[in-house]
Amino acid sequence: MPKYTGGEIISKYLIKEGVKYVVGIPGHGNLPLVDTFFKDKDKIHLIQPKQEMSGVHLAVGYYRVTGKPLCVFTSIGPGAINTAIGIADAFVDSFPCLIITGDTHVHMRGKGVLQEIERKKDSSMPKILEPIVKRSFEVDTIGQIPTTMQRAFNIMLTGRRGPVHIDLPMDVQANSIEVEIPEPLERRSLGRVRGDPELIKKATQLIKDSKRPVLFIGGGAISSNASEEIKALAEKIGAAVVVTMMGKDIIDNSHPLYCWSAGSKGTTIGLKMTSNADVILAVGCRFADETASSYKDGVSFSIPPTKLIQIDIDPHEIGKNYPVTVGIVGDAKACL
């Protein structure tokens, strides 16, 4: 069985996942990991941003263009904290990226190592980033790394996507162990959540009976690659397509059924369509205040009396801001 350092396990697993770039600034707390990326530079390339936050924004932009996540790594303390705004952006907008923060040696935690944040809790980064990541892992031994990497990618890329954080001490990066690098797909569900068939039937009947149906499309439909399904449904039932800021370009902007956006920054035609609809099919949108014109009745929406069908991969979003007639938990593309 081959012997690898912690950094080598991470680099080789990222390569197996098809990650072509890592983004970060070499520094205190990540040099063993950086050494490994240098050794594997023919297969995985290091991009050094000027500041860690911009590294996360780069990873989000890369995912939006390619549909593939990147890994962002940082040094201890300030370097890690610099990622917070970028991570929060990725979390709110549901974009996956892997954040690996360097940390002090396990046996030196709490001793006030250079840049360590430890006054209230030893090794505080997982606690600091907890509200803005899907999951935060604190790795104490090299043997945890293979499973942690698999779990991190599973969490990032399934359900409602988002960033995942791994806190990685320097000694864990440098230590070595005999281990096989796991295959990424051995522990991942690749199927789409299709939604309850009975609820889909009920939603279909509501749309059939409607006089003024509107499709209201958010970023979840973009993430699901549901453009063709949205276009086909709109054309079949003659429904206007109105979008959130994150749902832009779901169909061609020159399409006759495309009515631009709703909300406080919406268009006149978009607001007219959504506020006067008798049935709205909302796909992958959160009904945030910008979209809902601060929830003032009759501006963006008139729910009720408008009947709302809401499709979302995240059950917590169903009915959160407006009452639903039918709420369907599922992947946008599969449900449509």
Image (cartoon, rainbow, N blue to C red):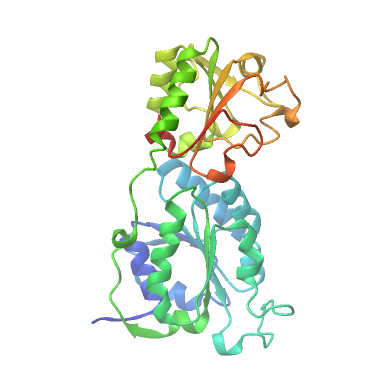
Query: Quick one: which residue is furthest to the left in this view?
Result: 1
Residue sitting nearer the eye, 51 or 148: 148
Q: Which of the 4 image quadrants contains residue 214?
A: top right
Residue sitting nearer the eye, 36 or 189: 189
Residue sitting nearer the eye, 285 or 68: 285
Image quarter (top left, top right, bottom left or bottom right) of the N terminus: bottom left
81 sits left or right of 334 in the view: right
Q: Which of the 4 image quadrants contains residue 129?
A: bottom right
Place of residue 102 in the rendered image (x, y in percent of width and height, measured from the top left): 55, 74
Place of residue 333 in the rendered image (x, y in percent of width and height, measured from the top left): 39, 34
Q: Is residue 273 above or below residue 71?
A: above
Q: Is residue 182 above or below residue 116?
A: above
Residue sitting nearer the eye, 245 or 121: 121
Q: Which of the 4 image quadrants contains residue 325?
A: top right
Q: Is residue 149 above or below residue 106?
A: above
Q: Residue at x 55, y 56 (%)?
A: 55
Image quarter (top left, top right, bottom left or bottom right) of the C terminus: top left
Q: Which residue is drawn at 65% across and 32% down?
A: 322
Place of residue 116 in the rendered image (x, y in percent of width and height, measured from the top left): 66, 78
Do we see residue 85 in this rendering? Answer: yes
Q: Residue at x 60, y 60 (%)?
A: 52
Do we see residue 47 in this rendering? Answer: no
Place of residue 236 in the rendered image (x, y in percent of width and height, measured from the top left): 39, 14
Q: Residue at x 63, y 34 (%)?
A: 287
